[in-house]
Image (cartoon, helix red, strand yellow):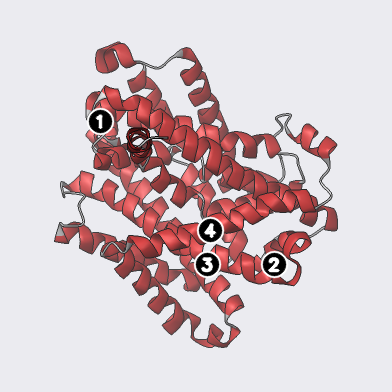
């Protein structure tokens, strides 16, 4: 390969970006908890959903990017301009509340994980340990220490790779996996909760809004960038996120389900790695989970601040002191997490992903309308295949959201 070819290769790689940020928030504790809980409770029953979740997420995200590239309008502007401002403001207020709720629940899981890693801090977890850790997260994301964030993402990805390798170390039921690829929906509360949690972390309508802001920030503001967006989504969401989810889910099904272990804590979840790494499973899982929470709190807060900035007319730029302040305060919401009670930490995380899913059907429906309007999109309207996948995602969002209302 000559220098010109090398340069061309790295130029092509440089265009991949916004989906990596979105996936870093999706490959977080919500997806980990949902997949491991789903596998341990249902076996291989919803493997089809896990396998499809990455590509469903890619399509839902991509419609947000496509519409932005043609119209120059990101999430809030789309909802405001193509519905009504009296709908857009309360609707986005609900979405903002949902994201803040997820951040708070991640603070709850952070406290659970930290106390398992260092039991000595448990008496001080609410008053000292978690506030200090969350302030560190806020400083890192507010002042842009990208290397620390990258290191955390690497640790999370490493854990996911171990889960994937783990599949070949356990007694996987290939016939069970084959049956699991036949679409079926669990009807019990825990199963439906896991189903909704997996969707909430991958293909909820919120990712379309989030991706629209990320491509806006990247400067992909013309239809010519749609091909790059497609590559971006297929690689990061369709492939990497898919591998991440399948590895965790199948490990849960093959190890925990067969032993009758229901996941209520991180220690239960860590047992899924025992066939591969034995006594080190606890520490590998806890460190990986801690790092995923660390990165996801900051990533979700950043996406949330794009919503807020668009609503109130603030530049979504870390050079803007107002945006930086909003981001810092948003991350601090995680400090409230340890004070929440009612469910075991891992189950609470799954429930939070279902809450995030509730806005999904309306968002996907609005984007379906906009993306198929010749008047708005011109020659860039959706193909029938794209529409079919979006419609399937919309229906699944509705099904998964039911879990929020089951007692």
Disc number lying in front (3 or 4): 4
Could you tell which of marks 2 and 1 lies nearer the N-terminus? 1
Indicate the position of residue 366 as horizontal and vertical percent values: 37, 27
Q: Residues within 10 Å of mark 1 (few under 14, many from 20)?
A: few
Q: Which residue is mark 2?
A: 281
Q: Which mark is residue 290?
A: 3
Q: CA separation, marks 1 and 4?
A: 41 Å
Q: Which residue is mark 4?
A: 156
User: What residue is drawn where x is 29% and y is 32%?
Assistant: 79
Which comes sooner in the sequence, label 3 or label 1?
1
Give the number of the disc on residue 84.
Answer: 1
Say few, some or many: other residues with alpha carbon within 10 Å of mark 2 (under 14 / 14 to 19 / 20 or more). Answer: some
- Marks 3 and 1 sit apart, C-alpha to C-alpha, by 41 Å
Q: Nearer the viewer, mark 3 or mark 1?
A: 3
Of label 1 and label 4, which has the lower sequence position?
1
The reply to whether callout 2 and callout 3 are in contact (CB within 8 Å) is no
Give the mark toward the camera: 2 or 1: 2
How far is mark 4 from mark 2, CA to CA? 14 Å
Q: Quadrant of residue 343?
A: bottom right
x, y percent for residue 381: 35, 15
> What element does badge 2 sit on?
helix
Spatial separation of the CA atoms under disc 2 and disc 1: 51 Å
Residue plotted at (44% across, 57% down) = 296
Indicate whether 72 appears above or below 321.
above
Label pair 4/2, CB-CB below 8 angstroms:
no
Of labels 3 and 4, earlier in sequence is: 4
Of residue 349 and residue 23, the one placed in the foreground of this image is 23
Spatial separation of the CA atoms under disc 2 and disc 3:
14 Å
């Amino acid at each position: 390969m000559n220098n010109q070819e090398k340069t061309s290769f790295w130029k092509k790689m440089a265009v991949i970006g916004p989906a990596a940020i979105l996936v870093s928030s999706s490959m977080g504790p919500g997806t980990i908890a949902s997949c491991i809980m789903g596998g341990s409770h249902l076996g291989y029953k919803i493997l089809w959903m896990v396998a499809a979740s990455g590509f469903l997420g890619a399509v839902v995200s991509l419609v947000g990017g496509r519409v932005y590239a043609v119209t120059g309008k990101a999430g809030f502007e789309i909802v405001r301009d193509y519905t009504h401002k009296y709908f857009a403001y309360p609707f986005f207020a609900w979405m903002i509340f949902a994201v803040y709720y997820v951040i708070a629940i991640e603070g709850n899981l952070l406290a659970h994980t930290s106390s398992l890693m260092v039991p000595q801090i448990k008496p001080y977890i609410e008053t000292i340990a978690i506030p200090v850790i969350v302030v560190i997260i806020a400083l890192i994301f507010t002042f842009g220490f990208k290397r620390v964030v990258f290191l955390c993402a690497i640790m999370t990805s490493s854990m996911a790779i171990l889960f994937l390798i783990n599949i070949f170390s356990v007694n996987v039921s290939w016939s069970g996996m084959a049956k699991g690829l036949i679409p079926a929906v669990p009807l019990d509360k825990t199963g439906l909760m896991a189903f909704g949690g997996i969707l909430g972390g991958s293909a909820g309508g919120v990712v379309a809004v989030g991706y629209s802001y990320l491509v806006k920030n990247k400067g992909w503001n013309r239809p010519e960038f749609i091909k790059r967006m497609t590559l971006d989504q297929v690689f990061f969401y369709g492939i990497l996120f898919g591998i991440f989810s399948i590895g965790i889910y199948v490990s849960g099904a093959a190890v925990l389900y067969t032993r009758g272990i229901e996941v209520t804590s991180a220690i239960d979840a860590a047992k899924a790695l025992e066939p591969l790494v034995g006594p080190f499973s606890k520490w590998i899982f806890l460190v990986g989970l801690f790092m995923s929470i660390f990165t996801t709190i900051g990533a979700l807060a950043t996406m949330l601040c794009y919503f807020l900035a668009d609503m109130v007319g603030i530049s979504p730029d870390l050079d803007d002191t107002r945006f930086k302040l909003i981001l810092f305060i948003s991350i601090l919401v995680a400090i409230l997490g340890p004070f929440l009670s009612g469910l075991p930490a891992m189950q609470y995380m799954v429930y939070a992903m279902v809450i995030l899913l509730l806005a999904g059907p309306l968002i996907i429906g609005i984007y379906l309308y906009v993306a198929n309007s010749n008047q708005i999109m011109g020659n860039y309207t959706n193909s029938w295949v794209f529409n079919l996948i979006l419609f399937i995602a919309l229906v699944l969002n509705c099904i998964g959201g039911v879990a929020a209302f089951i007692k």
